[in-house]
Image (tube, helix red, strand yellow):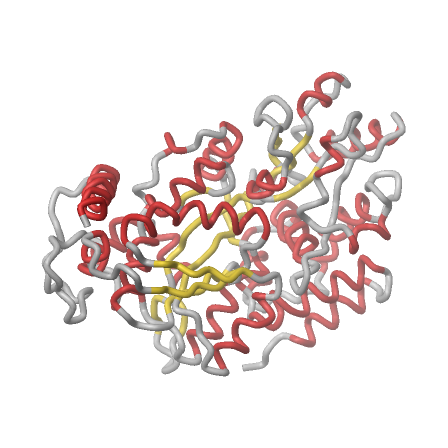
Amino acid sequence: MKTKKILWIIFTLAIASSMVLASCAPKDDGAAAGDTGDAEALPQGQELANAYAGMYDGTVVTMSGPFTDQDAVVFEDSIKGFEEATGIDIQYEGSKEFEATINIRLDAGDSPDIADFPQPGLLATAAAKGYVIDPRDVINPDWIEQNYTDAWKNLSMMAGPDGEEMMAGIWARANGKSFVFYPKAAFDEAGYTVPTTWDEMMALTQQIADDGDTAWCIGIESGAATGWTMTDWIEDVLLRVAPAEDYDAWVAGELKFDSPQVNLALDYIDEIWFNNDYVYGGTEAIPTINFGDAPKPMFENPPKCWFNRQGNFVTTFFPEEAVAGVDYDFFYFPPIDETYGSPVLGAGDIYAMFNDRPEVRAVFQYFSTGESLKVWIGSGGAIGVHNDASLDWYADPITRSVAETIRNATTFRFDGSDLMPGAVGAGTFWKYMTDYVSGTITREEALQQIDASWPTE
């Protein structure tokens, strides 16, 4: 018990220093829900303090999400310290089929205690059915107000079962997606220059083809989520060829997929994706290459491909021995029409709570702190959205640069498919774009099928 108490003191001090605990939340602040305990309260809620005092030692909290493979390893590492300090066992179940199965599980009454939704549209479905517990009933609302910006709080607001707006979850890690990673050492040795405009990027793409190589490393295979890589490209390019207001209208279902704006975005994408001289393995290989495997040929000697447009999280799939800023770097996905400035596309993971027990509250309160993401930030695979997450935690200069790029964006928009109704954003949009790239349907057919699938109510 002495060891447990020491760990509790250490972790309490760590959180205190990172959160600037000028004053503690009162024990009857509403977040405790009748479980006041004996420990001195923390700003997030009474249960978190109780957890560090060892009051929930031996309990289990189940969690489900899309983290698999290396992502799952990093996530497990990020929660290990909390588990050791509190004795709570967070049993995480990751699945590549998460997006396809989570709402089926919820409908069947088989809900995990906490789930990580990479698509807010899927969470919105669960919130509308009344499955979700409002975080403000679990976490001290003053802490939520203090530790999240308005942008992230607004993205948490969704319609509840009575149609009234509720907070459906809390944001954890974020990522920027408007980046092109490249093998820096080989790139510099080849004498190539980082492009700053779309035309320069396309000229370099052709130069690499003339040199006998393929420029682009592209793969869209991702289990039940196959196709999301293509949707990210469409979103990113749409922000470069049309006003942000058009992007917002498209996400809301007010601008059709089969519109001039979306077709124009696809024209630019097709120029790369459907040119076998530009894509590693040719167009036909794109649907069969896993998105995490796509950048690996960049690190062969010599590189088999040179560019991988992806979110900053993709660095977790790079070879362990690859050194950021030496073996690889990134450049900003260039603008097309200067009228629309320098937009950045981003996404993130929102955690939702489904079962209300003291130990679940403690874990959920912990996830509202930057400390819960510190290990992941240090590994280079996440951008922290919590206000108490320090830039000093970014040991990887590439990820820190990504965070700074996001901050300097003239326009920032959340991943469109993640905001759309789940049946579209995590369903028909993925499916029909995959069919289009595979050549089984035409572009017009794909776009019209997606439009026809949009919910009418």
Image coordinates of residue 6 in percent, x first then y, are 20, 42
Identified at 44% across, 80% down, the residue is 129
Residue 290 horizontal side relative to residue 359, left or right: right
Image coordinates of residue 112 in percent, x first then y, are 43, 70
Does 183 sit above or below residue 356? above
Identified at 48% across, 37% down, the residue is 379
Question: Where on the picture, by quarter, is residue 448?
Answer: bottom right
Does 190 sit above or below residue 37? above
Question: Where on the picture, by quarter, is residue 140?
Answer: bottom left
Q: Front-most of 320 and 312?
A: 320
Residue 124 horizontal side relative to residue 424, left or right: left
Location of the C terminus by quadrant is bottom right
Residue 334 visible in image: no
Residue 387 visible in image: yes
Image coordinates of residue 34 in percent, x first then y, are 14, 71
Q: Front-most of 169 and 444?
A: 169
Does 242 sit above or below residue 359? above
Identified at 64% across, 24% down, the residue is 327
Does 410 sit above or below residue 361? above
Residue 114 horizontal side relative to residue 286, left or right: left
